[in-house]
Amino acid sequence: MSNKKVAVVMSTYNGEKFIKEQLDSILNQTYPNIEIVVRDDGSKDNTVNIIKEYQKKYDNIKLYEGENLGFIKSFFELLKLVEADYYAYADQDDIWLEEKIELAVNNLNKLDDSKPNMSFGNSDYYDENMKFIGRGPRNKKYSFLRALFSCVTQGMTMTVNKKTRDMIIDNMPKSCFFHDWWTYLLCIGMGNVAYSNETVVKYRRRKENATSEGQGYFRLLVWRIKNLLVNDGMKDIKQQMINYKNYYYYQLSEENRKILDIFSEESYSFPLAVKKAFYPKRLRNNIIDDFMIRIIFLLGVL
């Protein structure tokens, strides 16, 4: 088995209710060389004390206490705090299957480590009490084009190499939609993505969750309309493309530069909107989602 060090980076905030289960699942991984690095994002509950109790029992847990930055900036700050071969994002309230890290390390070891690389798997959905709700999507399709409009993976299923981490902290984005989406864009655009079509995380769905994953389709549709249209989410996606282009344009392949040029153009014109709306390749995995985003192009929202 590989002996490369894996840093599990976890941002916590008022997570006292579930964090023990998550820490236990990480400590129970079959892969041995793991360091858990926690940055508490200004919790007001007992989260920090719980972590300190774990530190008394385990010497591979580090805790940093910081001001509230929000989870995106908190995760990026975490990447600065530890040196490792591989990095895995961890939320505070899920449960990892015991072979999650071993599987990711095996996948990453096969890739060219001079490029930004990622391994990810699937998650299944559970309620707050860890009662099974349903299986997450399988056989995920991904490409650089689709990555501009959606993140096919979730942060807690990701493991990336040091090259990815270094690229993030060297060019910390001024803004991005989510930390995991930005990470995914680096790997899909300039490196490699290894996908394992099996469950690696039990994803605890709570009403506080930031993402739409695991909701029924009608609720998912409402979430998307609210967050992408009403709350200017589409503008955030566009700004993420622009930031990405400013940082990495000349590191992309010619094909990916052409794609980015089309969809990151800041000024609106009807001919360009039509070109985007009738682009011949699929933009989103779901047919309805794909149709919706093409309508959004014609409306000039994105």
Image: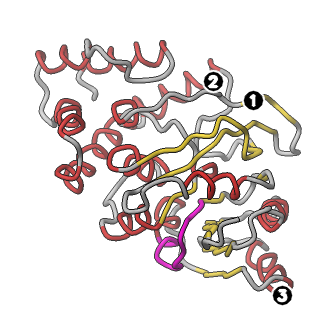
Q: Distance between the Cα atoms at labels 3 and 1?
A: 36 Å
Q: What kind of residue is marked 3?
A: Lys
If you read the primary sequence from the N terminus, does the residue marked by circle 3 or circle 1 appear first?
A: 3
Residue 75 rendering spot, x and y as whole percentages: 52, 65
Q: Which quarter shows the C terminus? A: top left
Crowd around label 2: few <14 · some 14–19 · many ≥20 (10 Å): few
Residue 115 rendering spot, x and y as whole percentages: 37, 57
Whether tag 2 and tag 3 are in contact, CB under 8 A, the answer is: no
Closer to the observer: label 2 or label 3? 3
Q: Residue at x 65, y 28 (%)?
A: 138
Q: What kind of residue is marked 2?
A: Arg
In the picture of the structure, the residue carrying the numbered disc 1 is 135
Q: Is residue 2 above or below residue 124?
A: below
Q: Which quarter shows the N terminus? A: bottom right
Horizontal arrangement in the rendering, residue 74 relative to residue 24 (left or right) = left
Crowd around label 1: few <14 · some 14–19 · many ≥20 (10 Å): some
Q: What kind of residue is marked 1?
A: Arg
Magenta highlight on residue 105: no
In the picture of the structure, the residue carrying the numbered disc 3 is 56
Label 3: state its secondary structure. Answer: helix
Horizontal arrangement in the rendering, residue 174 relative to residue 134 (left or right) = left
Label 1: state its secondary structure. Answer: strand
The part of the chain drawn in magenta is 77-88
If you read the primary sequence from the N terminus, does the residue marked by circle 1 or circle 2 appear first?
A: 1
Whether tag 1 and tag 2 are in contact, CB under 8 A, the answer is: no
Q: Distance between the Cα atoms at labels 1 and 2?
A: 17 Å
Q: Is residue 220 above or below residue 150?
A: above
In the picture of the structure, the residue carrying the numbered disc 2 is 219
